[in-house]
Image (cartoon, grey):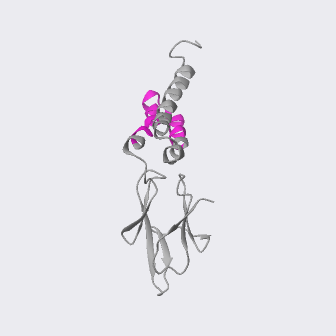
Amino acid sequence: MDLVTLNVPGARQTVELENPHGILYKIRLGGEVIKRGKGGWAIPLRNGSAAHIKAKGLIPGFQALFLDGDKIYDMGDGVGKLERITMFAPILLIIWLPFGLILGLLLFFLGLPLVKNLQVPRPARIAVPIVNFLAGALILTLLTGRIGIWG
């Protein structure tokens, strides 16, 4: 299991982040998944009070976790700006055709784990979303018969 221990001073139990390199993640307290409450996760402390972890960021899988205002983990750490920009290439399929939305979103979310994987060479992390866009554009073009191969 992909777990990262989060530094929460004074926590009653170990606080962990499950699946930090994927798209969807969970916060675990003492090995048990805790539910997100209003605005974040409440972490009980040894002194009887609670600390609050909040997630900030719009892109799933690239959010940062903050403990009472201080950053404790950045899920997109190590991913460069060029990779972050090119990962949106499949979204351009929406412009290609209105029903390209489904294929564009699917290719975008399938490419996120690859872009975040720092073990994949940087040129591949840049090229794959672009290739996904080109393949998606070709598929949509063939399906609509715009280039005349099927019709």
Q: Which residue is more in the foreground, 19 or 140?
A: 19
For the N terminus, give its image quadrant. bottom right
Q: Position of residue 74 (x, y in %)?
A: 43, 59
Q: Which residue is more in the foreground, 6 or 94?
A: 6
Q: Which residue is more in the foreground, 22 or 120?
A: 120
Res. 123 in view: yes
Give the residue drawn at x 55%, y 42%: 110
Give the residue drawn at x 48%, y 74%: 42
Q: Which contiguous range is marked in magenta? A: 85-109
Res. 99 in view: no
Q: Position of residue 101 (x, y in %)?
A: 49, 36
Residue 55 occupies quadrant: bottom left
Q: Main secondary structure of the magenta part?
A: helix
Give the residue drawn at x 47%, y 87%: 47
Q: Is residue 104 magenta?
A: yes
Q: Position of residue 9 (x, y in %)?
A: 45, 78
Does residue 129 lie above or below 36 as drawn? above
Give the residue drawn at x 45%, y 69%: 53
Q: Is residue 19 magenta?
A: no
Does residue 36 lie above or below 46 as drawn? above
Residue 95 occupies quadrant: top left
Q: Position of residue 67 (x, y in %)?
A: 41, 70
For the C terminus, give its image quadrant. top right
Does residue 106 lie above or below 66 as drawn? above
